[in-house]
Amino acid sequence: MFLTIQAKGLYFSYTVSAPYILDGIDFEIKDGDYISILGENGCGKSTLMKLILKLLKPTKGTIVTNADHIGYVPQKNDFSNANFPITVYEMLNAYRRLLKIKNKEAILEVLDRVGMNPFMDSLMGTLSGGQCQKIFIARALMGKPDLLILDEPSTGVDIGSQKEVYRFLKEINKKNGITIVSVEHNLDAAISNSTLIYHLSGGKGHLCTPEKYTAEFLKNEQ
């Protein structure tokens, strides 16, 4: 199967020397996987995400991302500020122009996919956390990504909307074959929806199934 992301002997430190946040990790993420990255605060989850996005360069080793189009859903966004006067349509239209997509129907298509067409003319700042998250996912899907990266997608989202968001992510992973990498603090969602868990601790990483993660790592924490 085609490898979407591959890390070999990956080290990273913001000081470019030991101690390393990521200490010689190796992993492979295959096309169509749904990976949740778990670990305590400060373990390097966000750092690894930035390395995958090529926002950071490894101190040593390599990380290769083989994706034609990458969609990114950040944890927070200024557009959700109540004082930021921009509508859902205006925000998505600006992103459409950035991607040089000529067809304006692309906006309606992604809004329809996430069930947010009725909110097209709403100000971003008036939306709930769950509604904003759906809009950010819609924006990421506009570029027709084969890899979707999310940073803690349930942060600031109510329980009901969380279920809708994760249900949708699981659906596009299975039906559309979009590879998903999600930095998570929502343990239940990670175990329920992921095909694999990548557990980071002490600079080291371990890739396993949700079942194995539950049996080994959670048992040791109890």
Image (tube, helix red, strand yellow):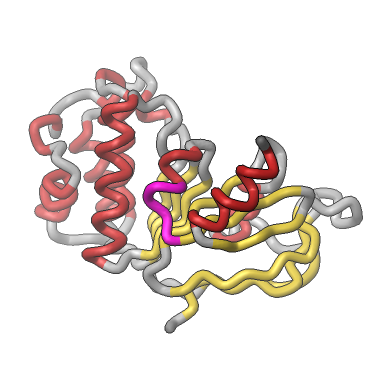
User: How far across and how far down the image is residue 89, in percent?
Assistant: 18, 37
Q: Quadrant of the C terminus?
A: top right
The residue depicted at 27 percent of the width and 28 percent of the height is 160
Q: Quadrant of the N terminus?
A: bottom left
The residue depicted at 10 percent of the width and 53 percent of the height is 105
Q: Main secondary structure of the magenta part?
A: helix
Q: Which residues are magenta?
A: 191-195
Residue 162 figure quarter: top left
The residue depicted at 49 percent of the width and 78 percent of the height is 3
Name of the residue lying farthest toward the top:
83
User: How far across and how far down the image is residue 159, in percent?
Assistant: 33, 26
User: How far across and how far down the image is residue 187, in percent?
Assistant: 50, 39
Viewer-nearest residue: 1 or 61: 1
Q: Is residue 151 magenta?
A: no
Viewer-nearest residue: 104 or 144: 144
Asked if residue 7 lies left or right of residue 5, the reply is right
Viewer-nearest residue: 89 or 25: 25
Q: Give above or below for 207 relative to 156.
A: below
User: How far across and how far down the image is residue 143, in percent?
Assistant: 29, 60
The residue depicted at 58 percent of the width and 46 percent of the height is 38
Q: Give above or below for 2 relative to 145.
A: below
Asked if residue 71 lies left or right of residue 209, the reply is left
Residue 146 figure quarter: bottom left
